[in-house]
Image: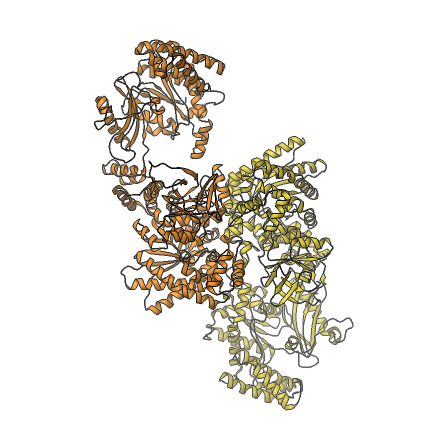
Chain colours: A orange, B yellow
Amino acid sequence: MTKWTYSFGGGAAEGDASMNDLLGGKGANLAEMSGLGLPVPPGFTITTEACARYGANTGTRPPGLETQVRDGIAFVERLSGAVFGDPDNPLLVSVRSGSRVSMPGMMDTVLNLGLNDRTAGGLARRTGNPRFAYDSYRRFIQMYADVVMGVDPYLFEEALAHARDEKGVDLDTDLDPDDLLRLTATYRSIVRSQAGEDFPDRPEDQLWGAVGAVFRSWTNRRAVTYRRLHDIPDSWGTAVTVQAMVFGNMGPDCATGVAFTRDPSTGEARLYGEYLVNAQGEDVVAGIRTPVPVTGNGGAGSMDEVMPEVYRELLAMRDRLETHYRDMQDMEFTVQNGRLYMLQTRSGKRTTQAAIRIAVDLANEGMISHEEAILRVDPGALDQLLHPTLDPQAERRVITTGLPASPGAVSGTVVLTADEAERRSHDGEQVILVRQETSPEDIHGMYAAQGILTTRGGMTSHAAVVARGMGRPCVCGAGRIHVDQEAGCFHVDDITVRAGDWITLDGSSGDVMLGRVATAQPRQSDEFATLMDWADTCRRLGVRANAETVEDARTARDFGAEGIGLCRTEHMFFEAERVVAVREMILASTEEQRRAALGRLLPMQRTDFEALFRVMQGLPVTIRLLDPPLHEFLPHTDDDIAELAEATDIPVELVRRRTAELRETNPMLGHRGCRLAISYPEIPEMQARAIFEAAVAVASDSAAAVIPEIMIPLAATRREIETVKAVVDQVAETVFAEAGARIDYLVGTMIELPRAALRASDLAESAAFFSFGTNDLTQTTFGISRDDAGGFLRTYQERGILEQDPFVTLDAEGVGELVDLGARRGRAVRPGLKIGICGEHGGDPASIAFCERADLDYVSCSPYRVPVARLAAARAALENR
Amino acid sequence: MTKWTYSFGGGAAEGDASMNDLLGGKGANLAEMSGLGLPVPPGFTITTEACARYGANTGTRPPGLETQVRDGIAFVERLSGAVFGDPDNPLLVSVRSGSRVSMPGMMDTVLNLGLNDRTAGGLARRTGNPRFAYDSYRRFIQMYADVVMGVDPYLFEEALAHARDEKGVDLDTDLDPDDLLRLTATYRSIVRSQAGEDFPDRPEDQLWGAVGAVFRSWTNRRAVTYRRLHDIPDSWGTAVTVQAMVFGNMGPDCATGVAFTRDPSTGEARLYGEYLVNAQGEDVVAGIRTPVPVTGNGGAGSMDEVMPEVYRELLAMRDRLETHYRDMQDMEFTVQNGRLYMLQTRSGKRTTQAAIRIAVDLANEGMISHEEAILRVDPGALDQLLHPTLDPQAERRVITTGLPASPGAVSGTVVLTADEAERRSHDGEQVILVRQETSPEDIHGMYAAQGILTTRGGMTSHAAVVARGMGRPCVCGAGRIHVDQEAGCFHVDDITVRAGDWITLDGSSGDVMLGRVATAQPRQSDEFATLMDWADTCRRLGVRANAETVEDARTARDFGAEGIGLCRTEHMFFEAERVVAVREMILASTEEQRRAALGRLLPMQRTDFEALFRVMQGLPVTIRLLDPPLHEFLPHTDDDIAELAEATDIPVELVRRRTAELRETNPMLGHRGCRLAISYPEIPEMQARAIFEAAVAVASDSAAAVIPEIMIPLAATRREIETVKAVVDQVAETVFAEAGARIDYLVGTMIELPRAALRASDLAESAAFFSFGTNDLTQTTFGISRDDAGGFLRTYQERGILEQDPFVTLDAEGVGELVDLGARRGRAVRPGLKIGICGEHGGDPASIAFCERADLDYVSCSPYRVPVARLAAARAALENR
């Protein structure tokens, strides 16, 4: 016979905390506490398996369930000394749901079950508190009628209001026991007329009605939606816990409250909680009375003063539970006639700051290991500690919400063009650049701005990627905003925001607010530093940063990056003085003209690399050769074309024609990456020269040289790598001969096309390292352009077609198979091949966990994500052990 | 000791035809003929392995080679009765190259080797023909000095001209033996002064010089280039054949010639050849005299009349060689003093028409099997039989050459817009549409035009794909053409062609010609039909066609298609009357408006499908739901926008905004395929309804219903398929209920994204069939947009980075792995899953061979490629046995 029920109480239990899946979180922890000998009102839990077997529509009960429930009630009767339905000493129970994972408020609960006219009378007599008894009865009818019988609770509220009016009082508490008793009769007649049947009097009927309703509530609409959103299988089902009621509202020696074993906001190691004397849990929730801290500093009414005995007992519970669970607990308790009952305990929710402090403290207290401490902190949540946040007290007026593309909160005045952003920023103004979308031409403005807001594009659109790289807060794809460039403003519905107006962005939530909202600066605690140290000793994966400026490189190093995993050389091309040379290079009709323009770029690139190499001394720096299609550098509007023609002395017509010629239907799949290097070998030649000259110069006057790792983008075949590598190697030899000095360097490739992953064994013949460019690899594997995904990717997520945005979290089963296969095939040919990833996924904890499983060597991410990646890498290593 | 030389002659040989790799084509066939007892001058072949071991720069000979060559010469001396260097009876030899595959004219040859002052005198005496002897000597010095010693042949020509001038004659033949003898002395002094050493007198020295030169010629520049272009490994090397000279120029009983065992142009079974009396092979090549047919119809000087005895012998050789080689042969022969010598035989080159006739005739003659007949015809070459070709006699003025995108030759007057094409075509004019590139908006014009010429885009650009589908000749990517829309003309360098001027396109070669060039209409022979029947009995792969119009479907059926593998429904949307409804649908702001517009499209689509289903009765028709991004249907220019606003009564501003909103950065990776069907389920709903209503109607009044196979494009996940399939299935049930009748149908998916192939096991859970869309799969696997590949793909092929255009021939090792893996994973979940391919590769023989190996069920290609596919499928099946 299947065991459907598990009892607990009296210092023992049939279940324990390990049976979470079968008994639900609540049931398992009640059993655990009871087993520990903690004062838990007796009860039993009906398993989730029973839920799965329960006929939600027919009410069919699995064989044996009825008997076991009857035995369970008998057990509770035995321990509580009360009897279900006994008019003199009635047993009242609560019936609560509890699934494997917390689904707060999603399912139903029935309290005070067991009351009817007769038992209510008995309760009144036995407690000597008829008001309490009839009020409980009234509440029970309302709750039961709502949950089990589907009667609109509003009708009861109306009847209650009517009773108050009749009596001419304002508060429910002004109704006397007789009023309440009369009210229960009214309630019962409401039930009869609404539900078409009588309110059940027999406690057994009440119980089965409630159990069935809780089971059914697993499939109610809000629970189903919640599960879809949180990816919880429908098959899990809910358990039902039936437990003897205890009352915190029977008099001044009664109370109810909630306490955390440590401060959930700061992590400080002290009992932190609130309670109410002579109250029920409901009262706290309903906000009718304001709860009082359990621990006062001489404060009035705190528990340590009002009921010091019980308080000491609660402190003991705190120690007991923390020692037992080895984590901060969130406890619910009730005091009935001076006696403390524990009603729930669970791991307490906490801020990230608190999570870090608690984890480090618990480890230092010897309660958990360093490894466990690492596993206790969600790496993704670290982000909020590394960026300014909105002052939680500050008022805010949110006008729309876009995608939280780059974290941090920031205020500034609206500017609508990159040039304007640069100009105003030079004047010391704090600006926010608002664009429909950004392009590489906007880089200088993005750099000058404090924050970026776009109306199109997703989490990995140009704006998002660049903003994260720069550590600028960014909200993307705020589609309800319409930018009107000509009028110099933008609209959200009927709100108009003009250039120069202040707005505030929260890049962590995607909120866009009017005006200046106060922000708080981030501060990393000592515990943070300790935890990061522990993480570094645990992790196997290296952590590098994507950076091209000295400032970014320094940030990355400060955050603990072990090198640069991706330096996008084209980002160095956009500064005003050099973009002209870049454009001349592109517009050149002959190789000679092109070489002349490249010659002007060489010293600038060399200077950039030298500065970068000095910051990164002793660490590897991975430099990607020019990647984007050339037309990205060309002007688009007639004015810009005219300006460029003027600046370069090239006829307008030629500029226009060349721009048109270079235009591509699908630039992402066009003439870019190593395809450029092969068409115009003089470009990689110049870039290689700049790199080697800079590296030789830095090596000559510093102890720790960098190791340049030159990376060939967008290769699909070995021949492409060979062709470009030959150019690079030849330049290296020339530079070394000129300088009379050699340095170590590597030439490797990005793996960002499915074919590159498939043919990794070919590619590894020529490439000394691999770096998976998972942004592009995701684009090509899915056939989704990041820039155009806005139109459907959100629909896909909302409708559950994709669980995650594959540009945020690496699609392990599709793109991931290619990464895995590419890594294995590459290493089969070149054992020990160094393999990293440098897409946006490099800073995403779930993706980092994948990289650990795939045995990659390092991840590379935005400088501001480096701590996230360090912690995530440690976690992944521990989970993978 | 390695055997480096293989002798032949005297009715025996050490080698045979199977040793092609070791002895080269020439050496192996000489050995074979000799072994058969045919009259072959004795000789020996130095192996390709010796070439590989020969030090090209140092002249180092592998150990043992010298001895074996000496033995070889002794063998030739023995059989010929002449002695190398003997002043009375000198042996002369030829030294020729011969590699595994024919590399015509790429490597060097030396004739008459063995001559010096003394042996030349001996030859003169022995032949009694001093003119012949000294002329041979003169020629030998010149050839040897050129090939072996690197002396410019022009110097010898000059000396020869000087000798003629001195004597005051015009022709070389007017020089007498003494003149020639004097000339040899002059030649030797030229050698001395140019090469800095004496011309070698010792025949042994001459021989080693010539052998070394032939070996070295394997690595000369033109040979290396040729190999790269034809994908021949450098490691193969060349063999060298040393053979006793025979002379066709020793008198009127001598001759030299070439003959085919069957007519290489028509395939007719008759000896077909040309010869010259008293001549050397050189004379034929140099065109000094015009050769005479070997078989005359009473014609003057034909061989059957001039030397009937030898002619009969040659006829006997023909039978002997055909019976032996079981194929049409191309023979070289020399007659010396009335005696026939065979100098070479090889499989003869032939036209496709001849290839078919010869293969069918040989099979009917019992010489080869039907299977062998199939293997004898190159399926790719069939194309030329299915389309008009240029009259080979007609004069042509080629102004530029683009990509041969869709075969066939055609003339017409130039039009520069689709509308103009339609207008003029209506007026009965034959037009050629010339565009920078085409888009779906041009479809009506492409249909109206006789041929299409574009200046951008590759073999699988829109123009190319559509033109092939329609069977219109097309030249693509003719980059030297600049179209000037405003001036109504196009330019190629300094040539201007105006709208209305006649041009001619050859879509098989890519040539663009001025004026009207006469063309010949295709005609399929009886042998063609026979061969196709044989092919059908051999092949395993089904062959379907890509078609959406009744006309195309009929063509496809006539060519033997077994169903439609791809009906692109969007092609039905572009006709003038319906594009307005399509645009209204796109511009709709609400679902209601969209449904109204779709309601207008429904009857049109239903009519289309009904007509298509009637043509294809009894066969499957695979229909792809709407695939391209919606903006492809929207107008782009201001005028078009205004016109549309007028036609639809939608404000210009809204049209403009919506058009801008729908614009995508990378439309190929954008909001298209099933992403549209998921965003706007009313679209697949309408399409499904049109399909089912049409299918039910056709089924009701015909014996053989079609089986609609509805195909969901661009899926990457199973959920996408489930979502769209649910819509289709529901419509099906509704239509069947309305009609009171059911039909069979399938819902499957395209596999055109790497992720779809990787997750094929998921997809096969919901999809009843797979169709690999290898165009898109190639684009995403390689990360190359077909539309933008023009800029670098040709460079890639020229530089050998890619051996083939992956859009023409399926990249077996990259894209192919995904196809293979997708097919295997799909079938693992759904055994017997029907799998086809419907990309452009479906008509490419090499790709079809891949499909056979990957065990796909069918290929689908343009209607005009169906015969190609049938033959290629048969070949692939045979080769795979």
Left or right: B267 as drawn, with respect to A165? right
Please, is residue A550 above or below residue B203 in the view? above
User: Number of marks in the image?
Assistant: 0
Q: Nearer the viewer, residue B419 or B255?
A: B419
Q: Is residue B594 above or below residue A728?
A: above
Quadrant in which the C terminus of chain A appears: top left
Is residue A366 visible from the viewing direction of this image?
Answer: yes
Q: Name which quarter of the figure residue B401 lies in.
A: bottom right
Q: Quadrant of the N terminus of chain A?
A: top left
x and y, in percent, of residue A727 in the image: 43, 64
Measuring from the top left, give residue A155's x and y in whole percent: 45, 18
Q: Residue A767: horizontal and vertical position, in percent?
A: 41, 57
Q: Nearer the viewer, residue B173 or B647?
A: B647
Q: Residue furthest right?
A: B298
- Closer to us: A777 or B856: A777
Q: Identify which residue, B714 or A523, lies in the foreground.
A: A523
Query: Would residue B375 be visible to someone looking at this image?
Result: no
Q: Where A42 sits versus B664, above or below?
A: above
